[in-house]
Amino acid sequence: MLSAFEKAIHLILTVDAELCNILSVTAKMSLSSSIIALLIGVPLGIVLGACCFRGKCILLVLNRTLMGMPPVVCGLLFYMVFSGVGPLRHWKILFTVKIMIMAQVVLITPIVIGNMETYVSGIALAIRETTKGLGLGKLKTFLLLTNECVYQIFSVYLLAFSRAIAEVGAVSMVGGAIAWKTNVMTTAIMQYTNRGNFSLGIALGIILLAVSLLVNIIIFLLQRRLSK
Amino acid sequence: MKTFAFSKTYNDVTVLNVPELELHPGKIYSIIGSNGSGKSTFAKILAGTLSADQKGIKLEPYISVGYMPQKNYAFRMSTKANILLGGSDKTRAEYLMKALQIDCLASRRADHLSGGETARMVLARLMMKQYNLLILDEPTAVMDMETTFLSENLIQQYTKESNCALILITHSLQQAKRIADEILFFNKGQLWEAGPKEALLNTPIHPETRQFLKFYGV
């Protein structure tokens, strides 16, 4: 086991080509999916948290259900739709990074919406009363509300990114964990461990944990700043 | 100016039912009453942040309304930037900050201010503009005596200078005595009694008003 650790450190230090490819696919998938989820989820979360409308409760319950959707179920749905017998088979995106990003967006967006909604609903009434009392318009109110959410948006983004980078169920189903093409850190760890190649698995595990640590440090610092 | 008659019902319980009121420019109307008597609901509906049972009912469009809610909100920006949200006149902002003794806090983040400082900042922010009707919901509740007097002076001065009708919701009968022209007594969601302050405080008509005043030592 110790030699596997040594080999893992060696792979990281010598910038192993396969390791670099896995990291690059992981970065592409995680960054793209978390940014897309943020772009969709933040405005929806703000609207859900700040506005009162008919059917809002149904949307909230639906979103909370989607927040807990098992990744393999999401993967299965995408597989059924885009596989050779699925209705969108002619898109030919199964086992590509594109479909991995799409599946991740479906998994992460409800988390972004839920987090933003919870935060915004806590401050929206006070902001609405204040801006109305000052005679400010809807656009100014929305801009002020968004400004109040800046740190929360960063925090939610990091949460979405850490979820994307650590996910394995959906990406392995729709991406297929194809070496040099769709293999990401989590699927590669599983693959190499099954093959008995612990050193590459450990190297990836170390990097994954380091990224997770970094993200959590940033979230902690942001939350501390928020509470000050 | 005239307000409208309205009611507010929650879960089949009518918590507020008020008649049309005639308010005169340059006068301060103090609303007094126990907790749950409907004072804040009245203010919210007049300010337009809460809808009455009579959907769509509003003050005449020419009446501009300023409103200071019970919970003071400070945006995550400097005190001065917060005040400038109320209007862009920097000289007036400086004047109001000095008058309320918060000029030394101008560059400090407003969401880091104390409760009393936040209340003064919110008051200054609101007084950046001129309104036909200004509603203040317990503006000095979290202030000390000195800053309460400062704020009261400014409220009186603002009312005269801008010639607006000012509604002041307060739990302090002493405050109502000091600055109000007329007092409105709310009880159980209804306007029980209203009139010039001397008349209402010295010779109240209703037994409930007398009891309320007696409880507060008036």
Image (cartoon, coloured by chain):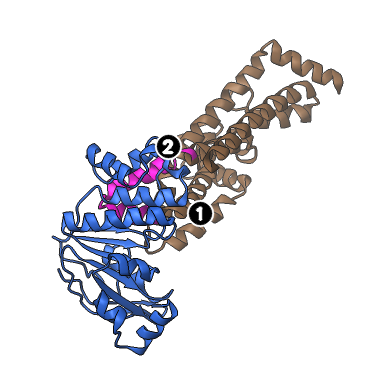
Chain colours: A brown, B blue
Image coordinates for residue B68, horizontal then vertical, percent = 33, 57
Q: Position of residue A83 (x, y in %)?
A: 54, 40
Q: Which residue is mark 1?
A: A63
Q: Position of residue A164 (x, y in %)?
A: 58, 36
Q: Residue at x 67, y 28 (%)?
A: A208
Tell me how far mark 1 sits from mark 2, CA to CA.
39 Å
At horizontal 60% and vertical 37% (from top left) the residue drawn is: A220
Q: Residue B207, percent across and down?
A: 36, 89
The answer to whether A185 appears left or right of A8 in the picture is: left
A150 part of magenta stretch: yes
Q: Tell me the magenta residue range.
A: A126-151
- Specify whether residue A58 is in view: yes
Which amino acid does the dot numbered 1 rest on? Asn
Secondary structure under tag 2 reads loop
Q: Which mark is residue B108?
A: 2
Viewer-closest of B47 and A43 = B47
Q: Residues within 10 Å of mark 2 (few under 14, many from 20)?
A: some
